[in-house]
Amino acid sequence: MGLTVELGRFPVVICRLTPDQGSGPLEGECGSYLEEIAKHRGIFVCVHDWTSAGELGGEGWRMVYERLVLDQVLATRCVAQAIAVSSPSLRGFATASSMQHRTPYPVRVASSLETAISWCTWQLRRSEPQAV
């Protein structure tokens, strides 16, 4: 499993899980993602694209959720996060996890990347109209 981060649309950050192997272990890639986000100024939203992700197993998905969605690095500047998931069982996991953990920002689970981006953009505009 690999992780790619697109910052070209900042303050909309797109974080993709891909079935191919990334530059290192997934947990290390999650740490690199958080370091990269910390370098940028201002508020932002995160869109997690899990639509093409392979299988990680229960513990793997839990680690990804905790590192990419719940990490404290995100707490002060993240306005919202959305997770795009095409798999019904993985969508159920993400929905249950988002309801189980309290975050300082709303988290939405969507069935498509377009819906996730649209919702996050709306949250960003709501938060600070001049941000987008």
Image: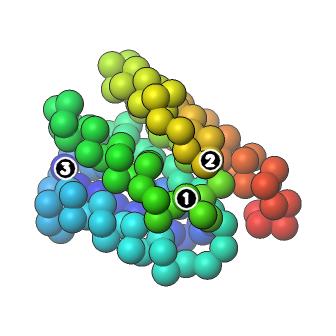
Label 1 SS: loop
Work out how far the residue at label 3 is from the one at label 1, CA to CA, in angstroms.
Answer: 26 Å
Q: Residues within 10 Å of mark 2 (few under 14, many from 20)?
A: some
Q: For residue 26, say whether it is visible.
A: yes
Mark 2 or 1 closer to N-term?
1
Which residue is the site of mark 3? Answer: 1
Q: Residues within 10 Å of mark 1 (few under 14, many from 20)?
A: some
Which residue is the site of mark 1? Answer: 75
Determine the image quadrant of residue 56: top left
Give percent across and percent down for residue 35.
Answer: 39, 74
Q: Quadrant of the C terminus?
A: bottom right
Amino acid type at image mark 1: Ala
Mark 3 or 1 closer to N-term?
3
Task: Indicate left or right for 65 with 104 as reference.
Answer: left
Give percent across and percent down for residue 122.
Answer: 75, 46
Identify which residue is drawn at 46% across, 29% down: 100
Mark 2 or 3 closer to N-term?
3
Determine the image quadrant of residue 128: bottom right
Task: Indicate left or right for 43 with 111 as reference.
Answer: right
Q: Is residue 53 above or below residue 90?
A: below
Which residue is the site of mark 2? Answer: 105
Amino acid type at image mark 2: Tyr
Task: Indicate left or right for 110 with 131 as reference.
Answer: left
Give percent across and percent down for residue 85.
Answer: 42, 32
